[in-house]
Structure formats: structure tokens, C-alpha cells
Image: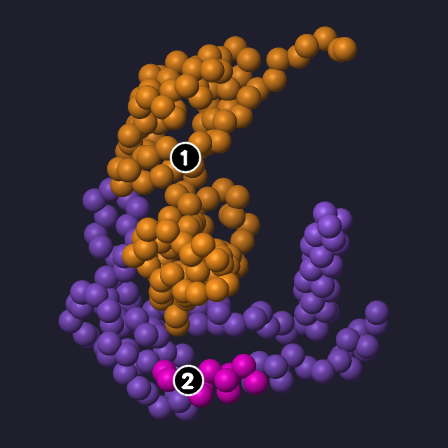
Chain colours: A purple, B orange
């Protein structure tokens, strides 16, 4: 397949915008900086959906359970949203590719794997 | 038949950190392969001294034909971390149907940082590791909330 053929395909960025608008219709949570340490559930707060920053429901300072695995480790606390890398907020969404050839490779690999799984299942029937 | 060649045997087992004892399940598994379980337990407990006691630690024990052994220690299972973070004992019996617990993206980030210490994921970006953990959460029935 040629590079030009790949360029002519519909841009993945359209799909990304569609996903973004889906998310904006749901309620968003704001972090309140400098919050006192809260035990138990963090209280969600409605925020304007036009904010460019992605927001987390986990307020800064909430103790994170289950992450202490070293002996005598101080309880891990949630940091403010800015301290986390930007890719973290996109981890729940499907992967986006800048390179159309990489996107095609990923898409084909998914299709091939699905086909293999179906074929294996059918061979047991 | 060709001449019998002695082969190294591999044992995969989940042992609570710092609490290896000659009793089952560790004892019989090693004893069957000719390894002195007391030696193994002493060495294992020494190597897992920095880990919170009781944490299930997957170990891969290689027993040579001359009964010497070496073992590799890995980070606790992802499902264990997720269940603790969500506060549940067991995952759902029907993955994809129903939610057993909820976990935040910040939990996922912290768990990914721990799992990144494993040798088999050293070549992956932290983002890729985080995505695999989200996949594990999906099979557990643990919902990941931003």
C-alpha cells in the first residue's frame, strides 16, 4: 500500500473529536488544590465542560489504597492533577496515531488477532 | 531413545513475601525436586525483606540437575493491587457484565510505576504499562474512573 493511499484515508483525528464531545456531555470533576486529607470517597464537584485541562475525580491528598507494597512505606497520596503526565488522562480512550501507516498497522493487527481467535473458536465447535 | 539428559526444572509459585516456610505449598514442591526448602526459605525471606510482609510474590525457581537452585522475584500480581485499591476481595464472576469496584486513574498510575520495575516490561513506555493495567481491570470488573 502506498503512502498516498494511506493519506487519502479518513483522518483519525475526526474520531478523536467525536470521543471528546462524548466525554464533555458527562459531568466533570474539579480538583480543589490544597485540600485537607480526606479518608474515604472524594466528593465530586460539577465543573464547566469547556475547560481545556482534563480533570480527575480523585482530589489531591486522597490516600491511595493498595499501592503500598514496600515495608514501612509512607501512605501514598494522590497528587494534584498537574503533577501527572498528560497521557494518563487519555489511557481510557482508544489509541491515537500521528503516523497513518502506524495506525493502519495497529488496525490490521487487531483485525488479524480477532480473526485468529474466531477461527480457533470455530475449530472447537 | 537418546541418552537421558538432565534438564533444569522450573517452578512457578506465588509466595507471601518474607513468610516462606518449609510447610506446604512451598515445601513439597521444592522437596520433590531435591531442594532443601530451609535454604530456599532463608534466601527468599532475605531477598524479600524490603517488601511488605505477606504480599503475594510470584517467583520463578530454576532447579539445576545438581540440586542447586536460583530464583527470580517479580512484582505482585496486578489483579492483587487492583482488588486492594478497589477494596474488593474477589473480581466479578462475569467479566464485561457488572461492576465489582471502582478505581481512579491515579491508582493506575501508581500501580504502573510499581509494575515498571519488572524485567519483562522494561522495554515498554509507562503509558503502555498503564494501558495493560486498564485491560486487567476490565477483566476483573473493576471500573476505571478518570
Does residue A72 appear left or right of residue B16 in this picture? left
Q: Which residue is mark 1?
A: B14
Of the 4 image quadrants, the one containing the N terminus of chain A is bottom right
Image point (31%, 86%), residue name: A46
Q: Please provide percent x and percent y for residue B140.
A: 44, 56
Name the secondary structure under disc 2. Answer: loop
Q: Main secondary structure of the magenta part?
A: helix
Q: Is residue B56 visible?
A: yes
Numbered range of the magenta stretch: A18-28
Image x and y of residue B115, in percent: 43, 49
Same chain for the residues under marks 2 and 1 in the image: no
User: CA gap, disc 2 to disc 1?
Assistant: 42 Å
Quarter residue B2 falls in: top right
Judge whether residue B27 is colored magenta: no
Judging from the image, mark 1 belongs to the subunit labelled B
Q: Does residue A27 belong to the magenta stretch?
A: yes
Q: Position of residue A122 (x, y in %)?
A: 74, 53
For numbered disc 1, what is the local secondary structure? strand
**Residue at (35% x, 27% y) in the render:** B44
Q: Give the residue at mark 2.
A: A26
- Given residues B23 and B122, the one toward you in this image is B23
Q: Is residue B112 visible?
A: no
Can you name the residue that lies furthest to the left here? A36
Amino acid at each position: 500500500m502506498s503512502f498516498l493511499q494511506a493519506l487519502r484515508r479518513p483522518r483519525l483525528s475526526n474520531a478523536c473529536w467525536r470521543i471528546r464531545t462524548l466525554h464533555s456531555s458527562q459531568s466533570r470533576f474539579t480538583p480543589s488544590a490544597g485540600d485537607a486529607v480526606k479518608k474515604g470517597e472524594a466528593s465530586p464537584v460539577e465543573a464547566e465542560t469547556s475547560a481545556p485541562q482534563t480533570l480527575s475525580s480523585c482530589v489531591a491528598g486522597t490516600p491511595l489504597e493498595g499501592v503500598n507494597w514496600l515495608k514501612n512505606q509512607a501512605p501514598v497520596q494522590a497528587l494534584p492533577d498537574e503533577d501527572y503526565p498528560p497521557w494518563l488522562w487519555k489511557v481510557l480512550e482508544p489509541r491515537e496515531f500521528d503516523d497513518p501507516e502506524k495506525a493502519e498497522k495497529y488496525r490490521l493487527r487487531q483485525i488479524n488477532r480477532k480473526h485468529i481467535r474466531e477461527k480457533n473458536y470455530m475449530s472447537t465447535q | 531413545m537418546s541418552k537421558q539428559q538432565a534438564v533444569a526444572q522450573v517452578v512457578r509459585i506465588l509466595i507471601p513475601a518474607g513468610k516462606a516456610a518449609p510447610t506446604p505449598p512451598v515445601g513439597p514442591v521444592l522437596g520433590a525436586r531435591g531442594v532443601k526448602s530451609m535454604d530456599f526459605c532463608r534466601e527468599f525471606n532475605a531477598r524479600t525483606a524490603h517488601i511488605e510482609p505477606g504480599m503475594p510474590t510470584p517467583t520463578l525457581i530454576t532447579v539445576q540437575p545438581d540440586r542447586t537452585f536460583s530464583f527470580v522475584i517479580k512484582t505482585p500480581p496486578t489483579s492483587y493491587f487492583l482488588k486492594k485499591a478497589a477494596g474488593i476481595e474477589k473480581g466479578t464472576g462475569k467479566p464485561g457484565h457488572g461492576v465489582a469496584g471502582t478505581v481512579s486513574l491515579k491508582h493506575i498510575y501508581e500501580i504502573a510505576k510499581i509494575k515498571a520495575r519488572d524485567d519483562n516490561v522494561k522495554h515498554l513506555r509507562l503509558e503502555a504499562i498503564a494501558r495493560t493495567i486498564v485491560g486487567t481491570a476490565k477483566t476483573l470488573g473493576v471500573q476505571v474512573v478518570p
